[in-house]
Image (cartoon, rainbow, N blue to C red):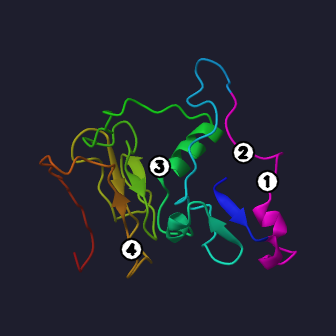
Amino acid sequence: PHLIMNWQNIDSNWVPQYTPDFSSYIGSTDQGSDDPHAGYAPYDYESIMHYPGGSPYDTDPASNENLMGNRRYLTDGDVQQILDQYQCVRKDPNWVPDANCNFEAGFCYWKNVGEVAWTLESGSTPSSSTGPAGAHEGSSYVYTEATNNLNKLFVLESPAIAADETHYVNFHYHMHGSNS
């Protein structure tokens, strides 16, 4: 009811891309009281899963054809279907990861996203005469191995934090060598 297929405009090799595969996920069944969603979601014209509009199909209503073919973002509907398919249960919507991290309990919600990884350590670094003998405070810290990593990108990404609040980062560094 949402797409009017123009089968004569679809190459026979592409027909399977436009037909349902009933052996794969096509909507939620009711899987009990903990099921985050049961039944079919409203039709999502902007879903990232759609090919752009054009000769293979028309939308009903026709005014929605310009919404098809989104490749920039996941829509709320896409996210809801992923959550349902994998039976994910949303956390409290007011939950925010704790950005206060001293690395005593691991990386917290910080992520390695650069070319060279950050390493969690306690005590001295494995390479001799390079890193600190221990953490500035506590027993754990993160470090990067600078040796043989000239002009590489070292990125440690913070968890999502509220933009309407004030945040501070305290960063201590330690270097050995003639150019430090």
Magenta stretch, residue numbers: 7-29
Question: Where residue 114 appears, x then y in whole percent?
Answer: 42, 67
Q: Circle 1 sits in a helix, a strand or a loop, which is it? A: loop
Q: CA distance from mark 2 to mark 4?
A: 42 Å
Q: Nearer the viewer, residue 80 or 140?
A: 80
Q: Is residue 29 above or below residue 82?
A: above
**Chain-order first, disc 2 or disc 1:** 1
Left/right of residue 16 with respect to residue 175 in the rendered view: right
In the rendered structure, are the residues bearing label 2 and label 4 in contact, judged by CB atoms less than 8 Å apart? no
| Three-letter code, disc 1 | Pro
Q: CA distance from mark 2 to mark 1?
A: 8 Å
Q: Which residue is identified by label 2?
A: 26
**Chain-order first, disc 3 or disc 4:** 3
Residue lying furthest top:
33
Q: CA distance from mark 3 to mark 4?
A: 33 Å
Which one is in front in this view, the residue at disc 1 or the one at disc 3? 1
| Three-letter code, disc 2 | Ile
Q: Which residue is identified by label 1?
A: 20
Question: Where residue 126 appears, x then y in whole percent?
Answer: 44, 57
Q: Nearer the viewer, residue 140 or 51?
A: 51
Q: Kindly report the secondary structure that dominates the magenta region of the rendered protein.
A: loop
In the rendered structure, are the residues bearing label 3 and label 4 in contact, judged by CB atoms less than 8 Å apart? no
| Three-letter code, disc 3 | Asp
The numbered dot on residue 153 is: 4
In the rendered structure, are the residues bearing label 2 and label 1 in contact, judged by CB atoms less than 8 Å apart? yes
Q: CA distance from mark 2 to mark 3?
A: 17 Å
Q: Residues within 10 Å of mark 4 (few under 14, many from 20)?
A: few
Q: Circle 2 sits in a helix, a strand or a loop, which is it? A: loop
